[in-house]
Image (tube, grey):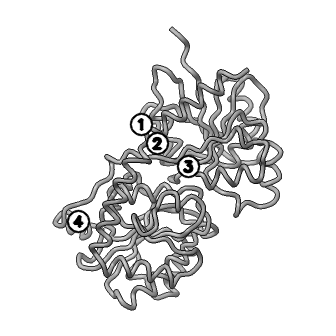
Amino acid sequence: MNARIKVLQLTVGLGWGGAEKLMADIALGLSSERYDCHVVSLKGDGPVGDVLRQAGVRVVSLGGGSPWRVFHRWREHVSRESPDIVHSHLLKANLLGVLLPGSHRVLWHIHNTSEQMGPFWRFLEGRLMGRASGVIAVSDAVGRDISRRFPPMSERVRVIPNGIDPSRFSTLLPPERCEEKKRWGLASEGPVLGYVGRLEEKTKKLTHLIESFAHLKKSNPTAILLIVGDGPDRKMMEAFIIRKGLSDAVLFVGAQKNVENFYPLMDVYVQPSISEGFGLSLIEAMASSLPIVATKTGGIPEIVVDGETGILVSPGNSLVLARAIEDLLSDRNLAWRMGNAGRKRVEKLFGFQGVLGKIEALYQSVLSKK
């Protein structure tokens, strides 16, 4: 019997984010008969680590701190474990992953385009990317961005979109939905707009979402904004909401393990980002049969078909965002058609088993090369 392939999934942290969710799904999805997989976090522990451990996946935290301290612990860990493949996610993990010599292969998983990356990090990424055995881009937009900046890497870039298990996501019948809305203190008669993801202003531009919601409230006074997630800018957002006089109309529920329970509470899903490599919450919302209002940036147009599964608008204009939301709230037949089409699109293109199969094929490919 052949020895199992040792795969080390390296990530920056273990909070709830799109990259961390995908990393966890890969770790949980790899066959234990073929792979010996464990997860390493550069920072501390988090809820994703709890989920992985409960499923029997080993999780190691390097504890954060100074770069030298993290590197020292990383070097000791790799020396002790001798992985066949280091599969790293997000910029800092990618950079650290290629710093050690050895026979292991390193795969970079790039989840974002480079618009918001500072010149120092662009420089480091450019100097070190050539050490990676392969690069996974989560969308064509991310793949084009990599190839444009680093033409010699073009042949090593593989576009593998993110995926989910659509069976985890569903709608609720009206009586069930009414009960769930009451449970969370949501008015049963008012429309609910939703956002799921990291509360980070630089790329997500959640102030644009709040401003568009303020515009919408003029014509839909009973509307509610439901925000699922956490992040470094939550306090800033809460203060912004108070200044806008919207405290009674916005509900924060924090990061949630079972996000599939929250999409059925929403009538429209909104993504206001000015930079987005993929947008995992978009396919989760579509799998929940929700119509989408999102911005034309990064990989979003590869997910949401404008006029078919949602409405796409230019980023940075809260009034245009509000008008698109209003169009869906005022035409429930249109919203239903878009939600239904979105569910079918996810089932056809974004199932996780297809994603996992492509990643495993890439593992085999890089291991077969001398």
Whether 328 is drawn above or below 151: the answer is below
Q: How many marks?
A: 4
Q: Nearer the viewer, mark 1 or mark 3?
A: 3
Residue named by callout 2 = 50
Q: Nearer the viewer, residue 62 or 240?
A: 240
Q: Which residue is denoted by mark 1 in the rendering?
A: 54
* Amino acid under disc 1: Gln
Query: From this viewpoint, is residue 81 visible?
Result: no
Residue found at x 29% / y 68%: 336
Q: In the image, what residue type sits under mark 3?
A: Ala
Mark-to-mark CA distance, 2 and 3: 16 Å
Residue 77 location, x and y as percent?
68, 29
Which residue is the site of mark 3? 19
**How far is disc 4 from disc 3 in space, using C-alphas?**
30 Å
Q: Which mark is residue 177?
A: 4
Q: Residues within 10 Å of mark 3 (few under 14, many from 20)?
A: many
Crowd around label 4: few <14 · some 14–19 · many ≥20 (10 Å) = some
Q: Mark 4 belongs to which amino acid?
A: Arg
Spatial CA span between label 4 and label 1? 30 Å
What residue sits 42% from the left and 69% below the top? 307
Provide the secondary structure element on which disc 1 rests: helix
